[in-house]
Amino acid sequence: MDQSPIADMKFETALGELENIVSSMEGGKLELEASIAAYRRGMELMQHCQTQLADAEAQIRILENGEFKDVDRKTLEAP
């Protein structure tokens, strides 16, 4: 199983790895310990993808004079 740093992954790469993990788990190809590790990795990949999607949605919503504005993630997470 690929153990590339998730934080550095593009959305498509993370989603592809997540799909592979789900396929392996559904196919019963993994032993218990490997299943647990795959589940943990899958959850991290899912959270990474959700964050990237949320960032993309925020960028789409923030339009200024017809141009995209960069989004400061820290501003979005402020209470």
Image: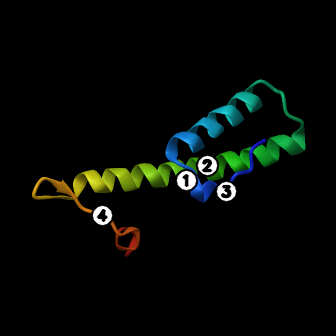
Q: Residue at x 84, y 28 (%)?
A: 29
Q: Give the image location of residue 2, x and y in percent.
A: 74, 44
Looking at the picture, does residue 24 appear above or below residue 32?
Answer: above
Q: Which amino acid lies under the numbered mark 2 shown in the image of this protein?
A: Leu
Horizontal side, residue 73 vs residue 36: left or right: left
- Which numbered disc flags the more N-terminal residue, 4 or 3? 3
Q: Can you identify the residue that label 3 sits on?
A: 5
Where does the C terminus fall, quadrant-wise? bottom left
Q: Give the image location of residue 44, x and y in percent.
A: 64, 53
Q: Give the image location of residue 36, x and y in percent.
A: 81, 46
Q: Secondary structure at mark 2?
A: helix
Q: Secondary structure at mark 3?
A: loop
Q: Residue at x 26, y 51 (%)?
A: 60
Cα distance in 3D space between marks 3 and 1:
11 Å
Q: Looking at the rendered structure, which numbered label has been put on residue 48?
A: 1
Q: Can you identify the residue that label 4 sits on?
A: 70
